[in-house]
Amino acid sequence: MAAHAAAEPAGRVRRRTWDCTRSPWWGTGDLSDHPDPNVAEEVGVIIAELHRSGVPDNVGGPAGEVGASAEADRALGSPLDQLETISRSLVRLLPEREADISGLLAELSGRLGPSRGFGPSRGFEPDRELREIHGDLSPDQVLLANSECRIIDLDRSGWGPIGMDLGRWIAACRFDPRVHQLERPFIAGYRSSGGEETDLGAWTAWAMLVAGLEPWRSCSVTWRDETMRIIDLAGSALREDSPTMGVAP
């Protein structure tokens, strides 16, 4: 996906206005290595436009109206299913944090659960609205070159809740001190382009917890401390005062 000129077309993916592109090595680095608040704001605008893309022939409609092929081919798995699986592994690795992890899971199940259309069942709830999302959004997915930026790694893209993208971006900014400054501009750009409201505190906590195994998977020598910090950050995100589009200072 390109913020400006596209490279060699690789063919149209099943979307209304968005194309996947293929190109040789491009740019001078990514946004995590070269943090730029202006680019982060532009990415927020782009993602808001992406999220306005609803399911084919049912833009903005409830998921219950979506055809079986769209559900099977493009819909992402249940966010709470992902969270429950990761949480069980976290408890096995850090049994002393079981109470904290269970508490976070219970609150997230309430804030993102069946009444919001994102419950444990992989079947779609009638009130759930699917949107086109990136699926793995973070500053290191944005390549830079002079005045251009390109959003890459679309292998996890599909139809899903917009909070997955927003939460992952915010979580990435809070995990990495280099990109703390990119959280607010991204949300500002998203809002300025008419991005929809969602429970940012809950989605940020969700994104943090589903990334909770990364220190262990990467064989970090400090994985225990890093994972403890992730759990603590998730708890802080969940306690934020503004559960819609607010961003912690």
Image: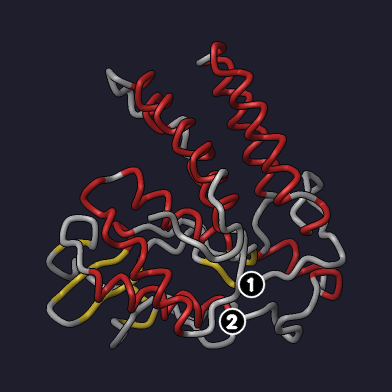
Horizontally, residue 158 falls left or right of residue 165, namely right
Give the residue displayed 37% in from the left and 57% down from the top: 138
Location of mark 1 (residue): 131
Number of disc labels: 2
Q: Earlier in the sequence, mark 2 or mark 1?
A: 2
Q: Position of residue 68 (x, y in %)?
A: 82, 68
Residue type at mark 1 is Arg
Question: Answer yes or no: do the residues labelled 2 and 1 have beta carbons within 8 Å?
Answer: yes
Q: Quadrant of residue 33?
A: bottom left
Horizontally, residue 202 falls left or right of residue 166, namely right
Placement of 88 over or under 136, stated as above or below: above
Crowd around label 1: few <14 · some 14–19 · many ≥20 (10 Å): many
Horizontally, residue 188 falls left or right of residue 118, namely left
Residue type at mark 2 is Arg
Location of mark 2 (residue): 52
Placement of 108 over or under 241, stated as above or below: above
Q: Position of residue 96 (x, y in %)?
A: 54, 11
Image mark for residue 10 = none
